[in-house]
Image: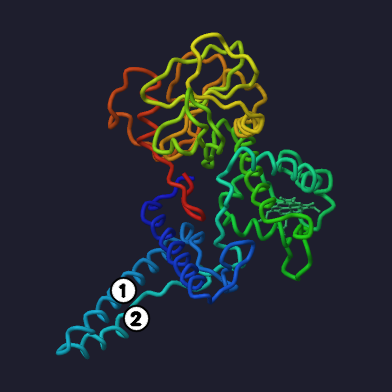
Amino acid sequence: MNIPNADWVNPLIRLLEAVQLAVLRLLSWAGMTGTSEGQPAWPWAVRLTGENLLIDLGQARRLAWTLALLAIAFVLLLLALFWRRRRWWLVATVPLLMLIAPWPDASVLLAPAQPTSFHRSPTGFSAASIAQGRALYAQDCVACHGAEGRGGPLASAQSVWPPNLAGPLLWRRADGEVLWRILHGTHDRRGQATMPAFADSLEADDAWALIDFMKANAAGQGLRASGTWAQPIALPGMTVRCDGHAPRPLSTWRGQRVRVVLADASTPLPLEDPRLVTIVVRTATRLHSTPTPECEVDNADARDAFALIAGTDTLPGLQLLADRDGWLRARGAPGQATWSEDDLVCRTDLAPQAATRPPASDGLGALIARIDAEPVRFVKGGFVH
Ligand code: HEC
């Protein structure tokens, strides 16, 4: 998605989110709201949303101006507290500012909310959670939504066709609202149930696991169909064993680039490279004789998660690169000898000109330069790449 001016709309959407989260934390700290599914519950039936601001830049501009004037009003009130002689002048200016503020339309800014709207997933997008979600999906969801997420045998019997779960839907929705829909079902305008509720058979943990699985699945489907990860997908969480060290979570390498190599006995392992951390994920009990990997993962959930995200069953020899923020960015096909910029499958359309990047001595260097120059700027309800 390439949207002009997203550079200033994104921070605005982030601000709306942060302010509401802060209010929620404050309410919960003051004991003024209960909990829902283990996290503080949003007490109102509506919330502020940024989704529409990207479509309606005029409203986004009005909101930005209004927020700026509100900030000035706040500063004036603070000043009035201390500056006695000018106090009434300062205070009188505030209603004036509120009058001239170009308030945005409430209908653009407000969206229906659920108690779980601001919930964060506790799973860390782990391979174990994806595997848990996969089993539940096969059991409870596949009949209507289909193995690929595009509709199953019961889809046509529903009053509305189930949405395509293999597309960008899950990146546009607030995670907490997807959670709510899985647990409590969906209803049409007349209050008629469109998707059944699963709260009787599933816990919140199960629903979070389903969300992880559906995202991994959608990423793989997208890669198969279009050759790109149109929505950013994170390196899944898993436990890594390194020579002579206690096992540690893969996420502890956040801040460094990670290269994941899926390997069996026929896969020659790449040499260590100072630009990356190399993690070997075994797809077989025996590995190629040399060199021995320094850090490795030997776990069926991890293999399955990578198969799902990469949309392929041919794992040995597959390589994936994650950036310093933990987003998966590039894919190297099995048997591919070197890297090039074409391997970047999670990219923005706002690519900086090649000329502005430092020249690279090899394909991997060029790819890394491009990854660093185009960081993922993922904002829920905003610009997603
Ligand atoms: C009986 C059929 C049926 C089953 C079973 C079912 N769904 Fe749905 N699902 C639907 C329909 C129909 C919709 C569209 C609802 C709407 O738009 O009003 C939907 C919508 C959704 C959505 C999109 C919600 C949104 O925000 O728009 C998600 C996510 C979803 N289902 C996940 C699941 C998961 C996970 C399961 C298994 C636990 C599941 N569904 C089981 C029929 C089903």
Q: Nearer the viewer, residue 186 or 57?
A: 186
The residue type indicated by label 1 comes to Leu
Compared to residue 131, the image places residue 283 above or below, namely: above
160 sits left or right of 338 in the view: right
At x 48% / y 39%, what residue is drawn? 251
Q: Residue at x 50, y 18 (%)?
A: 293
Residue at x-position 72% and y-position 43%: 150
Q: CA distance from mark 2 to mark 1?
A: 7 Å
Residue 310, picture quadrant: top right
User: Residue 321's x, y, as percent?
Assistant: 48, 29
Queried on whether the Cβ of the residue with tag 2 lies below 8 angstroms from ligand 1, the answer reads no
Amino acid found under the numbered disc labelled 2: Met
**For residue 294, side relative to residue 224 (left or right):** left
Q: Depth check: 46 or 30 in front?
A: 30
Percent x, y of residue 290: 51, 9
**x, y percent for residue 131:** 68, 39
Which mark is on residue 98? Answer: 2
Judging from the image, what secondary structure is the residue with disc 2 in? helix
Which residue is disc 1 drawn over? 69
| Residue farthest toward the top in the current orientation of the protein | 289
Q: Earlier in the sequence, mark 2 or mark 1?
A: 1
